[in-house]
Amino acid sequence: MSAKIELKKVADDKVKGSLTYSYKDASGKVENDDPIEIPEITLKQTSTGTIEAYEGTTKIGTYSNNELKVEMEDDFYGSISITAKK
């Protein structure tokens, strides 16, 4: 299974987007689940340069040293943890 995150800038400090899971079926064909909407996220840069991501007042992720870490909850999938390196 793999996932693709697409984000769009909606303001200098805000993004929103979608998360799409892909997997191979029994025949080896790649299938995509319906995209999960990522609600508006506020980005804040700390004094150390780390960028923190917030959904409302809840911190859901960080970006530092070319590594993105996201923790969020989905009604269907439950707890989602993503780590990606640039």
Image (tube, helix red, strand yellow):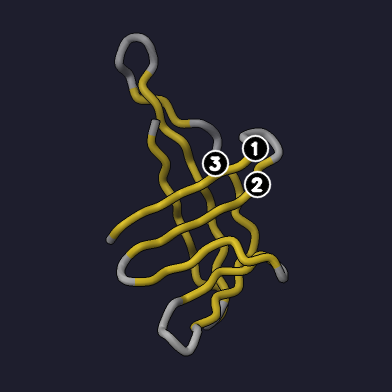
30 vs 53, left or right, is left
In this view, the residue in front, 66 or 8, is 66
Spatial CA distance of label 1 from label 2 is 5 Å
Q: Position of residue 50 (x, y in %)?
A: 43, 78
Q: Is residue 20 above or below residue 59?
A: above
69 vs 54, left or right, is left
Q: Nearer the viewer, mark 1 or mark 3?
A: 1
Task: Report if the CB atoms under discs 1 and 2 are less than 8 Å apart.
Answer: yes
* Kind of residue at disc 1: Gly
Q: Which residue is mark 3?
A: 35
Task: Report if the CB atoms under discs 1 and 3 are less than 8 Å apart.
Answer: no
* Kind of residue at disc 2: Glu
* Kind of residue at disc 3: Pro
27 vs 53, left or right, is left
Q: Position of residue 60 (x, y in %)?
A: 59, 61
Q: Is residue 6 above or below residue 53?
A: above
Q: Is residue 76 above or below residue 42?
A: above
Residue under the image location 48 percent in, 67 percent down: 62
Q: Which residue is mark 1?
A: 78
**Circle number at residue 73:** 2
Tell me the element at label 2.
strand
Residue under the image location 47 percent in, 76 percent down: 51
Residue at the extreme bottom: 47
Q: Position of residue 16 (x, y in %)?
A: 57, 63
Q: Quadrant of the N terminus?
A: top left
Tell me the element at label 1.
strand
